Amino acid sequence: MPIRVLVVDDHGMFRSGVRAELAREGAGVVDVVAEAADVDEAVARLAAEPVDVVLLDVHLPGGGGVEVMRRTQADGRPRFLALSVSDAAEDVIGTIRGGARGYVTKTITGPELVAAIRRVADGDAVFSPRLAGFVLDAFAGAIDVAAVDEDLDRLTEREREVMRLIARGYSYKEVAGELFISIKTVETHMSSVLRKLQLSSRHELARWASDRRLL
């Protein structure tokens, strides 16, 4: 039997791309049986559809990916694999604490994603190499996750996404393309981020994010 997959992401174009990629690279192995765009829809889909693995975005309307796991996971089923644009330490650690069996970024290739789904379905833990280090550092006490969370609580989920990309050196146009939003919306989010964090420039933001290991 193919592995039954639910794709949860608030961008319809991304969900369609994942479905097409899995159909091409995972034919006979993986079957996308449903999609969802937010927390409530994901919970409803999981109540109605037998699913083996959930491909779960971290930042979702309605409470985020952790809220989906909190409301649906029982006895280790279904298994959750985070598939996110974010590779920030606190997102990785928080998602694993919430119950995910793995965490990969959206730069993953189709064949790699199929392999990751198979491993998670078999009960293995799957991480991109850099992300596995975050989990080990957290357990070793090298990352003060509580302090990072306190700063980020001031920002909305979308502002966090914009903040990380800008801090990495993305232009406003590149951020808009990555997040499927307008350049004007990026500018609005950036202004809000700087105001909330009491920073004056993107250069200060880059230092702020680097000090907290968010890049």
Image (cartoon, rainbow, N blue to C red):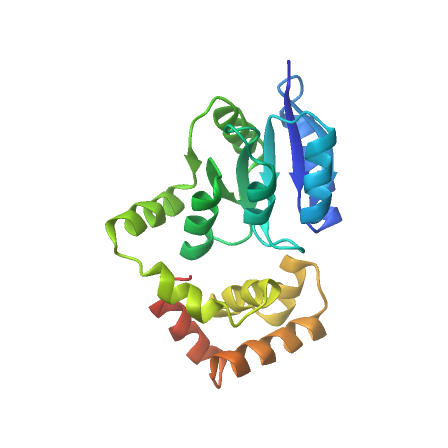
Residue 7 is drawn in which quadrant? top right
**Depth order, front residue of 173/75:** 75
In the image, what residue occupies the spot 67% across and 60% down?
177
x, y percent for residue 39: 67, 48
In the image, what residue occupies the spot 65% across and 68% down?
173
**Depth order, front residue of 86/109:** 86
Q: Is residue 88 visible?
A: no
Quadrant of the snapshot with the N terminus: top right
Residue 51 is drawn in which quadrant? top right
Q: Is residue 175 above or below residue 68?
A: below
x, y percent for residue 64: 59, 52
x, y percent for residue 191: 59, 80
Residue 80 is drawn in which quadrant? top right
In the image, what residue occupies the spot 50% across and 64% down?
164
Residue found at the far top of this picture: 1
In the image, what residue occupies the spot 41% across and 69% down?
209
